[in-house]
Amino acid sequence: MKFVKDSMEHKFDRKIFTAKVFFGDVFFLISRSPRIIGAFCNKKINKALIEKIMTVSTAVNGCVYCEWFHAKQAVSSGISEEEIKNMLSLQFQADASNFEIPALLYTQHYAETSRNPDAEMTQRLIDFYGKKTAYDIYLFIRIIYFGNLIGNTWDAVLSRFKGEPAPNSKLWFELIFFLLFFLFMFPTMFLMKRDAKKRSKL
């Protein structure tokens, strides 16, 4: 019984890409690249809000690589470590401004519903920010959601190497995914471990 319990506890349960979703997202982001560039120029959305959106989505989706990266980016954007911890615990409302809260609540809702937000929530976002800024916020959410699933899918590949494949994950797609991302992910893992060692010495 203990073996069964341990196996259930270690079951991979994070959201990951399927081939269809992955290639669909790649097409979506490439086809909207001019609009994404424009979103970064939207003066209503500063760097701090972008990083908060990234951090909240990461908190829901549980990507360890995104958490490491965006925590560092958030600090460089002037966000305190305490506020980052609160966002990673989804306790952001006390720290966020009235302008930021609707965007962060929508980010959380979007991630928690696996990209199937309620139409009412989407309309509230549009009503508050206006169509252009609301869509730019949506693009930032799509970018980080893509990043979250890259990190999680990479961990699913590693889990298969350990003999514990993620549910509903296909070996052929994992092999393609590994070949696409290993040159990026192995250095990321190295940098994460290096940072962890530095923090342990402090």
Image (spheres, rainbow, N blue to C red):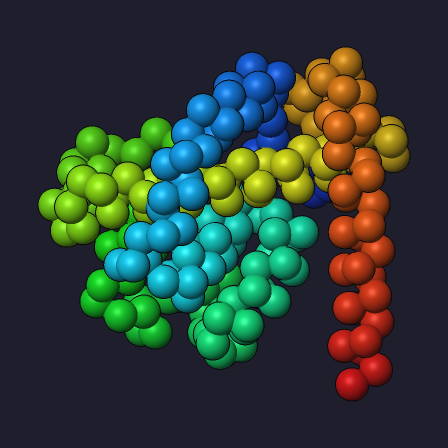
Q: Residue at x 66, y 41 (%)?
A: 151
Q: Quadrant of residue 193?
A: bottom right
Query: Can residue 89 be seen at all in this image of the molecule?
Result: no
Q: Residue furthest right?
A: 162
Q: Residue furthest bottom?
A: 202
Q: Where 158 falls versus 168 (above or below)?
A: below
- Judged left or right of residue 44, residue 20 is right
Is residue 100 placed above or below 197 in the rendered structure?
Answer: above
Closer to us: 176 or 152 = 176
Left or right of residue 65: residue 75: left
The image position of residue 171, as x and y in percent, is: 77, 17
Return the residue nearer the eye: 47 or 202. Answer: 47
Residue at 48% x, 40% y is 143
Measuring 18% from the left and 50% from the top, which residue is drawn there?
Answer: 129
Q: Residue at x 22, y 42 (%)?
A: 132
Q: Give the quarter of the figure containing the C terminus.
A: bottom right
Residue 46 visible at all: yes
* Quadrant, the N terminus: top right
Residue 173: quadrant of the picture:
top right
- Residue 193 vertical position relative to residue 12 in the rendered view, above or below: below
Left or right: 86, with 126 as reference point: right
User: Residue 38 location, x and y as percent?
Assistant: 36, 44
In-image side of 131 versus 17 (left or right): left
Q: What count of labels does the image hold? A: 0
Q: Is residue 34 above or below residue 65?
A: above
Q: Give the image location of residue 59, x and y in percent.
A: 51, 54
Front residue of 189 and 168: 189
Looking at this view, is 111 or 11 the one in front? 111
Measured as percent of width and height from the top left, residue 192 is found at 77, 60
